[in-house]
Image (spheres, rainbow, N blue to C red):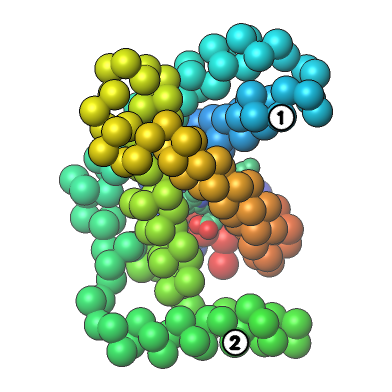
Amino acid sequence: MEAIQARHNLADMTYINPLPVRIWHWVNALGFVLLVLTGAQIRYTDIFGVLTFESAVKLHNWVGFAVIANYFVWLGYYIFSDRITNYHPVLDARKFATNFFQQAQYYSYGIFKGEHSPHQVQPYDKFNPMQRLAYQLIMLTAAPINFVTGLMMWDTQRFANWIAAVGGIRVVDTIHVAIFILFVFFIFVHAYMGALGRTPITHYREMFTGYEEH
Ligand code: HEM
């Protein structure tokens, strides 16, 4: 009886996070946390004394390359699959603005009154407009800029021309650190928002199992 019930429940669930997205996501999350920690160690050597400067740089570089390679799992998956509609369900600016405003109202007010989110999660339209915008800014702007600035600082000789074009190594470093601060902020807000499901671990579980829990 329990087995039948379990099978029925599975059939009732919506598959929203395919395997490549789940693998990419958790490798990425671990990678980013390590990059933030080793980055803080490199930048503030006198405050943190966990690793030597050299070990922190070495680890930061290795994890950086792993995160860059992993990024292409996410990008490749969405470019070559029909689930790209999750990021662009309808290209309608007016509708996007209206839904964005409704979602902001929900997060700032409705949620505290126990209302339901105005966005209905579907396999090909799983993000609300605020998620869609935030994820695209992070994944298509902030992350690639930090990959490139990181590469430039990894080998200043090889990328000397690029560094000069941007305005020098101090400019490259400032951009890299500014985006690092943005990522720290993003990770906290993102992890908190991820806990706003039916229970605090519902969305986390969905990112492991792939299935949305109604
Ligand atoms: C400790 C770190 C993290 C936790 C606990 C976490 C948690 C979650 C959860 C629960 C979801 C599913 C809910 C949703 O779709 O909004 C999710 C999705 C997502 N997260 Fe994270 N995350 C973490 C780190 C990151 C980082 C560092 C990034 C990017 C730099 C990131 C980018 C994303 C993206 C883009 C999605 C949507 C996945 C898709 O494209 O289908 N996450 N995260």
Residue bearing mark 2: 105
Question: Residue 48, image x and y in percent?
Answer: 79, 25
How far apart are the two marked residues, 2 and 1, measured between alpha carbons? 39 Å
* In this rendering, position of residue 146 left or right of residue 179: left
Secondary structure category for the residue under label 2 = helix
Secondary structure category for the residue under label 1 = loop
Q: From the viewer's perspective, is residue 95 above or below residue 91? A: below
Residue bearing mark 1: 44
Res 187 seen here: no
* In this rendering, position of residue 156 left or right of residue 110: left
Going by the numbered disc 1, the residue's amino acid type is: Tyr
Q: Residue furthest left?
A: 80
Which residue is depicted at the point 57% across and 61% down? 213
Please identify the quarter of the rendering in which residue 127 is found: bottom left
Which residue is depicted at the point 71% across and 29% down? 44
Question: Residue 67, image x and y in percent?
Answer: 44, 29
Question: Residue 106, image x and y in percent?
Answer: 61, 84
